[in-house]
Image: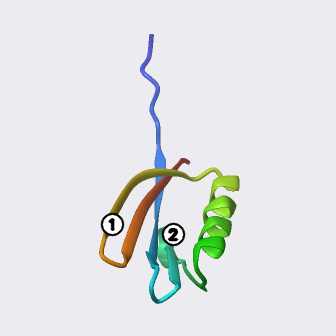
C-alpha cells in the first residue's frame, strides 16, 4: 500500500490587539491588512476557515498574537 503524500499551503495572521491591526500573509507575497478588534478578527478567521484554512500554531506575547495557518493544496 502506498503512503499518502500531503502537500500543504501555509499562511500567517498577525494581530496587534491594542492597535487593532490585522495582517494576513499568503503564499506569493499576497498581503491583506485590516483594522479592527475582536469582531473583525473573528470575521477574518471565519473567512479563511471557509477557504479551507486551519490553525496550525499560535504564538502570543504582550499585545501580539500570531497564527500559522495551513490547508491541503
Q: Secondary structure at mark 1?
A: strand
Query: Which residue is nearer to you in this view: 7 or 11?
Result: 11
Residue matched to label 2: 26
Residue matched to label 1: 60
Measuring 63% from the left and 65% from the top, which residue is drawn there? 42
**Distance between the alpha carbons at the discs numbered 2 and 1:** 20 Å
In which quarter of the view is residue 59 placed? bottom left
In which quadrant is the N terminus drawn? top left
Percent coordinates x, y for residue 54 in the rendering:
54, 50
Percent coordinates x, y for residue 20 in the rendering:
52, 85
Does 10 appear above or below 28? above
Q: How many labels, in total? A: 2
Q: Secondary structure at mark 2?
A: loop
Q: Contact (CB < 8 A) between labels 2 and 1?
A: no
Which of discs 2 and 1 lies nearer the camera? The answer is 1
Left or right: where 68 falls relative to 37: left
Percent coordinates x, y for residue 71 in the rendering:
54, 49
Amino acid at each position: 500500500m502506498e503512503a499518502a503524500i500531503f502537500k500543504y499551503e501555509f499562511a500567517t495572521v498577525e494581530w496587534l490587539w491594542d492597535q487593532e491591526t490585522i495582517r494576513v500573509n499568503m503564499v506569493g507575497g499576497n498581503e491583506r491588512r485590516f483594522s479592527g478588534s475582536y469582531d473583525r478578527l473573528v470575521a477574518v478567521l471565519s473567512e479563511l476557515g471557509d477557504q479551507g484554512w486551519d490553525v496550525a500554531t499560535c504564538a502570543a506575547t504582550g499585545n501580539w498574537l500570531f497564527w500559522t495557518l495551513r490547508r491541503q493544496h
